[in-house]
Image: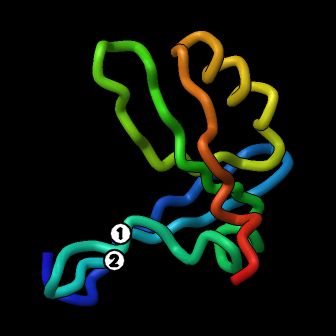
């Protein structure tokens, strides 16, 4: 993958369409669009999630469509995980 190339993730449902991009940079990757603007505008919420399934807690970034929050809460419960913070709610 060359610098500035991007992979577009397109989520289509009967009720909505949502997009996220992963962009290659010379230092690594942008894994998401901006959490508090672009993703939010596209219907996503972005969370830092802690998983407690193993002896060592693991940290993940999850992008959740706002219409799927109840499914996400069920996923968190089933996987012994919790939201540390929602990144789309930050106002810096």
Residue that carries the numbered disc 2 in the rendered image: 23
Q: Nearer the viewer, residue 21 or 53?
A: 53
Q: Position of residue 70 (x, y in %)?
A: 81, 28
Residue 28 lies left or right of residue 34; in this view the side is left
* CA distance for labels 2 and 1: 6 Å
Q: Nearer the viewer, residue 41 or 53?
A: 53
Which residue is painted at 35% across and 69% down in the image?
A: 7
Vertical placement of 50 versus 13: above or below? above
Residue 58 lies left or right of residue 40; in this view the side is left
Question: Mark 2 or mark 1, which has the lower sequence index?
Answer: 1
Q: Badge 2: few (under 14), some or many (20 or more) residues near its Cα, within 10 Å?
A: some
State if disc 1 and disc 2 touch (CB < 8 Å): yes
Residue 26 lies left or right of residue 32; in this view the side is left
Residue that carries the numbered disc 1 in the rendered image: 7
**Secondary element type, mark 2:** strand
Which residue is painted at 49% across and 34% down in the image?
A: 50
Vertical placement of 31 versus 26: above or below? above
Q: Badge 1: few (under 14), some or many (20 or more) residues near its Cα, within 10 Å?
A: few
**Secondary element type, mark 1:** strand
Which residue is painted at 61% across and 70% down in the image?
A: 35
Q: Nearer the viewer, residue 13 or 23?
A: 23
Position of the C terminus by quadrant: bottom right
Vertical placement of 19 versus 60: above or below? below
Tell which tag, 2 or 1, sits nearer the viewer.
2
Position of the N terminus by quadrant: bottom left
Q: Position of residue 78 (x, y in %)?
A: 59, 10
Q: Position of residue 71 (x, y in %)?
A: 73, 25
Q: Position of residue 18 (x, y in %)?
A: 67, 61
């Amino acid at each position: 993958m060359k610098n500035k190339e991007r992979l577009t993730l397109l989520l289509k449902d009967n009720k909505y369409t949502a997009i996220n991009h992963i962009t290659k940079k010379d230092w690594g990757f942008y894994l998401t669009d901006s959490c508090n603007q672009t993703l939010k505008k596209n219907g996503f919420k972005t969370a830092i999630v802690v998983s407690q399934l193993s002896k060592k807690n693991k940290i993940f970034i999850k992008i959740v469509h706002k219409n799927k929050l109840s499914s996400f809460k069920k996923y968190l419960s089933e996987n012994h995980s919790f939201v540390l913070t929602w990144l789309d709610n930050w106002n810096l």
